[in-house]
Each structure stands twice: as C-alpha cells, then as structure tokens.
Amino acid sequence: MISPLKRPKKVSRELKQQLCGISSNCLGNSLGLELPEVISLQKEASDILSLAKGLRNLTSPVGRLPGDVLERILAVRASEQDLLTATCVCRRWRDILLSSPRLWAKFRCDNVVRTLRYLERSKLVPIYVDADLYSDTKAVLALKSATDRFGSLKLRLRPQDLLQVFHQITTPAPTLEHLEIHLGAGQTFPPSIPATFLGGFAPALRSLHLVGINSELNFPALTHLTLVTNSHVFYMSELFRVFTSARLLEEVSVKFCGPTMPIPGSQGVVSLPQMKKLSFSNETGGFPERLLSLLFMPSVEEVKLDISLPGEDTRTMLDFLPARYPNFPHLLKADNLKLSVPDAHCNVQLSGPAGVVSIHASRMGSRQQKDDFQSRWLDSLEPTSITSIKGLTLCNYRPEKPSDQCPVLRLLQSMDGLRSLAVERCNNAILSKALYPSPNGSILLPHLESFTLQPSTNLKAVFPDLAEIARARGWEGFPLSKVPPDQYAAFRRSDVVAPQRHVNSVQRSAEADPSPPANLCVQPRAKSSR
C-alpha cells in the first residue's frame, strides 16, 4: 500500500510522464477528451505537483528543525556570508532569519548596500560594527543614522578616512559599550579623537582600545582602557587626564615608545578605588615614575612593568618596584619570588596575598654589559626589603661559568627563611653549589622543606647528584622506574608532610632498573597552554 505522503508523488510522476511534451489538442485527440476536460486535467496535475512538493518539505530535516533552535545555531556558528546563504535555503528559513534582528546585529562595513541591509534587518537592537582598511568609507558614514544603537564600534581606517568619520558621525551613542580605534604607525604627533565625535556623549562606554591615537572625550563609566602609541612622543598628561575623568577604571594597559612628556607639577593625587590591574610597557626605557606617584590604587592586585634599558642605565629592580611608592602600601610584602634570567632579560615576579608585581627588564648591548646588568639586578633582589619571601622559582638561568660568587648563589645565601625552591631549565652546576653541604658542614637554606627540579638536560644525567643531595640533607622521595627527560624531580624533607600532588608519583614497575636512586620523586609536567 502506498503511504499518503508518497501517493501524490507517485501520481504526479505518472501524470507528468503522460502529459509532458503533449499539447492539449493532441492529448484530447489521443484520449478522446474535449479541450476543457484536458485543461482541467492539466490543472489537477499541477496542483498535485505543488502538494507533493509541500509534503516533501514538511518531512525534510530542514522543515522539522524548530525555529528557535535554528536561530540559536546560526547565532553561534554563522558568519555574515552564512547568514546570507541561509536566507536562500527555503522560504521558511528566510522568514525565521528575517524575523530575528539579533542575527543581523554584527557585521562589517564592506559596502553601502550590505550595510544598509543589515541596519534594516537588525531593527532596533544594539549593533556591533567592524570597519577596516578594506571597508567602504561611504558604508561607514551610513552608520550615522544608527549611532543610538551602537553596542560596539571598531575602526581600523586610513588617517584621512578616520578624520572624515570623526567629523561626520556627531550624534550621541548612549548604548555604546566598546570602542576600538586603530591608526597606523609613523605619526610623529598622534591625532586626538575630537570632542564632537559621537556628540561627545557615550555614557555607557566600558571598554576603550586606542592604537596610535589620543582622545579628547570624557568617559565617566570607563572600566577597561588599552592605550598603544607608536608615535615618537608620548604625552603622560593625556593619560593622566583619562585617569582623572574615569574613576571607575579596573584594568589599564599602556604601551608606548620614545620619550615621555611629563605631567604638570600642579596635578594632585588621583584615587582609583576599583583599579585591579595596571600594565606599562615601554620599548625605549621610559618609566612612568611621576604618574605612579600620583595614582592611589588601594585595591590593585596586579602590576606589570615591561621596560627596555639603554646601555648606560644603572637602575635595578628596586628602582622600579611599585612598593617603593606610598600609593602601593599593600604590595610591600610578598610570599613568592619568581626569576627568569635568559641572556639580556630579567623577569621578576613577586606574589603574595595582596597581589602580583611583575617586572620584565631587557638590556641591549655588549656581552659584558648584559652580564653586569644581570648581576646588578639579581644583587638588588637581596631580601633587605622583601623579608617575607618563602618560595623561590628560578628559570632559564644558564651562566657560562657559575662560581661561588654567582649572583643567584649570593641571593640564596641571603634567604635563610626560604621554604620552597623550584629550578627550571637552569645550569645544573648552580643546583650542586646551592644544595650540597659545604666542606665545613654548613648547609645553605637550612629551612628548605621542598625542592623541585626540571633540568635543562635529561633528568637521568643528574641522578647521582640528586641522590647525593637527598642523602646529605636528609630528604626523601619515592622510588621511580623510567624517567622521561621532560619530567620534574621533587624532594621533601622527611619531617614535612608530603603535599597532595606527591601522592600520584611514578612507582617502581616490574621492568624497572633494579637500583634506581631511592630518594627521588618524579612528577609529570603539566601540559602547557602554549
């Protein structure tokens, strides 16, 4: 028996085979029918064909997909071109898409026709617009009729096009939350966003990202600021003016190069009670000392400084430590210190209950200048002002000929209260000199409770040294079987309770070497996100 859904298809196929290519008169003569009867029969066949097509659409996967599910799928996965293609699938899909304005709220200003179409289909919802170097300037200017619906605006245009946009889009944007403007490099004196842009009124703006350009606007609700300048001169007064007008800032990242124009001496201290993260980066060595001294941030949790020092600069880490400023009182104490000292770079990170301070300093010059730079920076870390350090992580330090006067050894000699030491990819001779008991029986770091090592070479090569150190210091570990070269070795003092992470250490297997070092604990290295 033919199912009701398939019967029209079968009937229509038979009628189509009979009627296709036969004129009404010929068909009437062959079947012995009058012309009106033939026309009626052809109309019935056409109706059956339409019915069969509709029934097939109802039973297809496209027809069974609920409208709200389709809208969610396209909202998550579809690109602009996918949306335009989806409107051509069938009438039902087109009706669903055109009745969903949020699907058309995010678009690029490729050309005027498409921009106007997106503005029409997005109706009254906030729009998220992206314009780049390949965008049509006329399409960008067409947005001035919808500034009251801006949710996000990204402009990466040529200077002449950007200035044209600034002077023609002058109506307020009360719903704008994210503004990103990029201007190319090579501007000796970066231009500023005029006060007439967006009517000078963006009360809901939360995030501002400026590259190669300054701003004359005030954003009282601003919480996230990123400022990157490629010009030859950076005006600290411009940044300070933003701080003065935006007291709700939570995260600030500033990257600049070249000399900085100072802040006028008449400026007072600005309080930023909600500031959590502050980052400064300068490729030519300038440091915002005056600016930091004028910012009071009682809740700051993370401070990052990235500086490049010229060959004659003799400043050390303590000169850049934010804790030396009275506006950072809660960052004076730290529990952990992390050092990474590859070549002409020094990465210093101090972390404690109140927050994190990271300083990345680099030095370009001769080999002797680089060595002197590292020695001075490491010597400046002697915990005369950092007395609470309990944990130290040393990374990427590989001096050619480490001696007893190595800066790292001098640093360790001054850290009697150190409880935890981790060494990653460093010269193994430093490990031996730091942890072996001296000939007179004295032990460096007498209160050390745990030690973790990731050697720069195969871990098996340092087995004898590790076992000897463990026996000399009374440390214990777990037996092991096979040690891949990318694993950590970890020890703990016998009178200290093992941390939880030591429980799953590698155990001796049946095929193991019958005499591995007994005082060694091996832990797999965590997979890096990089």
Image: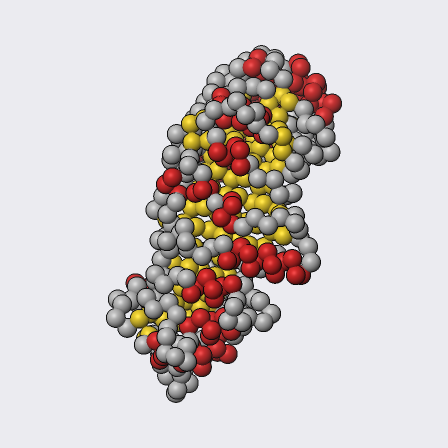
Q: Is residue 276 left or right of residue 195?
A: left
Above or below — where is 329 with respect to 193? below
User: 489 or 169, which lies in front?
Assistant: 489
Toward which corner of the image does residue 69 lie, by quadrant? top left
Taking depth in this image into account, of 43 and 197 the one nearest to the observer is 197
Return the x and y of residue 443 as percentages of the image width and height: 37, 73
Colouring used for the render: secondary structure
Residue 91 appears in the figure: no
Q: Residue furthest bottom?
A: 514
Horizontal placement of 7 versus 439: left or right?
right
Residue visible at 53% across and 15% down in the picture: 201
Q: Quadrant of the N terminus?
A: top left
Residue 317, percent from left and from top: 51, 50
At 39% from the left and 76% from the top, the residue drawn is: 437
Q: Position of residue 303 (x, y in %)?
A: 47, 42
Using the rendered image of the protein, determine whether residue 500 is visible from the camera's viewpoint: yes
Q: Quadrant of residue 141?
A: top right
Identity of the residue drawn at 59% across and 20% down? 216
As rendered, which of 62 and 310 lies closer to the eye? Answer: 310
Give the residue displayed 42% in from the left and 27% down from the top.
Answer: 271
Q: Is residue 281 above or below residue 375?
A: above
Q: So how many labels did they put on this image?
A: 0
The spot of residue 435 in percent (x, y) is: 42, 72
